[in-house]
Image: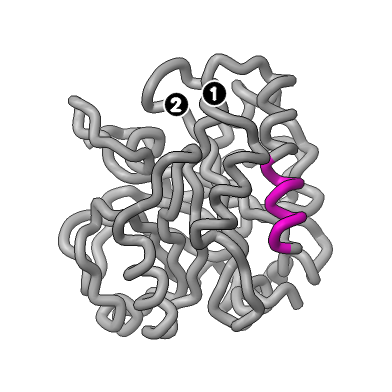
Amino acid sequence: MTNSPVARRSLPRLAAGLLTLAATITATLLVSPSPAQAATTAGIDVSRYQGSINWTSVRNAGVEFAFIKVTEGIGYKDSNFNTNYVAAYNAGVIRGAYHFALPDRSTGAAQANYLASNGGAWSADSRTLPAALDLEANPYGASCYGLSQASMRTWISDFLNTYRSRTTRYAVIYTTTSWWTSCTGNWSGPWANHPLWIARWASAPGTLPAGAPYHSFWQYTSSGSVAGISGAVDRNYFNGDRSRLIALANNT
């Protein structure tokens, strides 16, 4: 296993054993938690590497939400996505899809369309979150995919704008502060509208990207465990209670 979220969430397991993986103050968009609310709404994120999942057991273990890998680039769809997405919903888990970005392979618009057309769309059913754009160090080459900071910002904007035009929703952005700083120049643009899913495997979320007033989701470990899943799984918190999570899901 690696010690970085980078390789865990991409398609192949490489030789080293790579594994899977701001919101705004406008409550109607990002569901800002009150200061009294602690980050205690438990969640996970999964891909085909978790194998067969018993989602009823997962829900009974206290897991409230899940992000489920659906696509990568414009040529890969996770083989377990359809099963996981339906089973999680049926078990009462609030779920969203996530897309592993490959900004050097195709345009942001192309990848947003691929996501939206292959399971990453949205519906107001109290159990579907807007999809997440997974932005992290390139597991196949240069960390920033060979893009300048300006080009990366353009690519991300292209993706986000296209996803919103397809679904009406602002996508969640998964990233680390270090990658975001290095590869976008610590760009603050998205955080006026897009929920931040911060990855930091530690006891606190730590410093957030510039302009992000708070995180909406926090991936705090890659070596968690939960009933219904064999082996390690990423564990997350939502920064609010279940009612606020449902409000984010429904854009209310």
- Residue range corresponding to the magenta coloring: 159-167
Q: Is residue 162 magenta?
A: yes
Q: Is residue 142 magenta?
A: no
x 68%, y 52%: residue: 163
Q: Quadrant of residue 169?
A: bottom right
Are the residues at dot 2 and dot 1 in contact (C-beta closer than 8 Å)?
Answer: yes
Residue 111 picture location, percent across and down: 58, 41
Q: Is residue 41 visible?
A: yes
Q: Tell me the kind of residue under disc 2.
A: Asn
Q: Quadrant of residue 226?
A: bottom left
**Spatial CA span between label 2 and label 1:** 9 Å
Identify which residue, 204 or 235, lies in the foreground. 235
Which residue in the protein does label 2 denote? 138
Which residue in the protein does label 1 denote? 104
Q: Secondary structure at mark 1?
A: loop
Instruction: Please name the predominant secondary structure of the magenta segment in the image.
Output: helix
15 displayed left or right of 113: left
Query: As displayed, is residue 114 above or below residue 124?
Result: above
x 43%, y 50%: residue: 203
